[in-house]
Amino acid sequence: MVASELTHGQNTQQVESGTPYPVEHKQVDVLIIGSGPVGCTYARKLYETGRSVCMIDAGALLSKRPGAHLKNAFLYQRNVDMFASVIRGHLHTLSVPPNRSPELTLDPASFQVDLNRYDGFTHNNQNPDQDPFDNLPAAAVVYGVGGMATHWTCATPRQHPTIERTTLLSDGEWSELYQEAERLLNTHNDQFDHSIRHTVVCERLQQEFSELKKPYQPQSLPLAAERRKDNDELVSWSGADTVLGPLARESEYDTTRFTLLEQHRCRRLVPTNDRTSIAYAEVDNLLEWRTLRIRANVYIVAAGAVLGPQLLYNSGIESPALGCYLSEQPIAFCQVVLRQEILDAIGEEARFADRIKEHRNKNPNDPLVIPANDPEPQVWIPVSEARPWHCQIHRDAFAYGDLGPNVDSRLVVDLRWFGMSQQRKENCVVFSGEKKDTFGMPQPTFHFALDRTESETMHRMMRDMLRAASALGGFLRGSEPQFMAPGLTLHIHGTTRIGMDQETSLSDVDSRVWGYDNLYVGGNGNHPQGNASNPTLTSVALAIKSAQAIAR
């Protein structure tokens, strides 16, 4: 049940000393902070064990089904490029260095002093402490039920078993966890195989990269998506609601045991006097400006790789690893227009003849042989030891790579090559004890840089992308090959990493925070080593393992 007030258990209101707002008290078995796929994994798994679960999110409900993928709307299925503006509107940049240009003030020195002394709420997360030269300028979060899963690309590859995947879990355990994570996310790798564009792009890349053998050759991208049975031109893209399953439909669950609260910000978790467990959570109802004090047997922070550590910092949770060992994925990007020879070959292919004939009969004036309803390509070149980068060749909407109004999307293919950085303690996110972000929480500041080896690998990655692009076509004007702003993949890892050592990890292999018997963390921040693949599937797998440990 989505609500603005808690409805399960004893609920009292009173004005307590220290706050002018009414205070409500609540007791549940499990409190989950964050409603993305990881939070929803915990909610579903622990609800299924008979526990009462309350899940909160600082953002608003954006869809009828909580956490649904917004690209499922008919308009965006018809024109995916229009979805890019939706994504941009939902992304909130985390740390913006103020423009200290002399033109902004008659006295630049005093302007500098004023910025450094400023300790109020920031506008648009402007951060005077952020050095622009070691920032992640494109790092951003989504405030909304479902989190990033309201607009993600739904790519769900498994990590490479030696380059990316941690050995803290056995191969057998990884296999079982991945299978269950793929079930929860509804992963398929064949939903675009009938597409003409998908087929020709995949085969052209297989010809170009003929030295790559199974399982590392160009192939169909695993996607948390399924083509609809009632209209196979449309796709049901998985969101957090997919993971919730029956908990996304109020008629199918016990409303006394599951509650989802939108626009409720957890300000801090309050430890017991001996600091071995969490006593209660202080939560602000942002709709009615009330304070909730929620007591639970288990507290799970699944608020993301930056907002999660931010909450722990604000709660006084001390760890030498908190916010450290940050890794992210440098990205190279370009868009190409398919070669004329590829288009001509499509028209001569016997296996496409029936669809092309039908298209020409309905659209005799269309200069392209590709049917207007032909699905986009969704191709993947996996990470391998000789090529430590993840490659996606598709046509999708993101916060960049828009097409102009006079460009036919059927001709364009996006190439996104995701690199890898290793986790080092000095790469980190730290939080201010004075300055606050838009939501009144400690302002994050990034310190991140690639080392020489990583930079050289990124240039190898760029050359590899150019090879793929040249096999497919020429560059679309304005989308020539480029390294994108750091943080743009929105795939930060390591800030709450699991491990065996309390000095170098925040949590154990079951994602329990060291030193606390009832506090767990979940999400991409838990990854204990750098990786290039899309992280969601692995994060859900780790959440499944953690939920199993909690249930025991």
Image (spheres, rainbow, N blue to C red):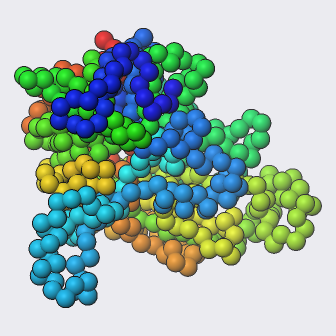
The image shows residue 219 at horizontal and vertical percentages of 56, 48
Query: What is the quadrant of residue 108 in the picture?
Result: bottom left
Q: How many callouts does the rendering have? A: 0
Furthest residue in direction left, as rendered? 274
Q: Residue at x 36, y 19 (%)?
A: 11
The image shows residue 298 at horizontal and vertical percentages of 28, 21
The image shows residue 365 at horizontal and vertical percentages of 88, 71
The image shows residue 197 at horizontal and vertical percentages of 68, 57
Query: What is the quadrant of residue 137 in the picture?
Result: bottom left
Q: Is residue 11 above or below residue 84?
A: above
Q: Is residue 301 above or below residue 51?
A: below
- Nearer the observer, 376 or 80: 80
Q: Residue at x 36, y 37 (%)?
A: 285
Q: Quadrant of the C terminus?
A: top left
Left or right for 258, reference 83:
left
Camera sees residue 318 = yes
Q: Is residue 2 above or below residue 363?
A: above
Furthest residue in direction right, as rendered? 361
- Nearer the observer, 229 or 304: 304
- Nearer the observer, 186 or 129: 129
Q: Residue at x 18, y 57 (%)?
A: 435
- Nearer the observer, 463 or 214: 463
Camera sees residue 200 = no
Left or right for 225, reference 141:
right
Q: Residue at x 81, y 72 (%)?
A: 367
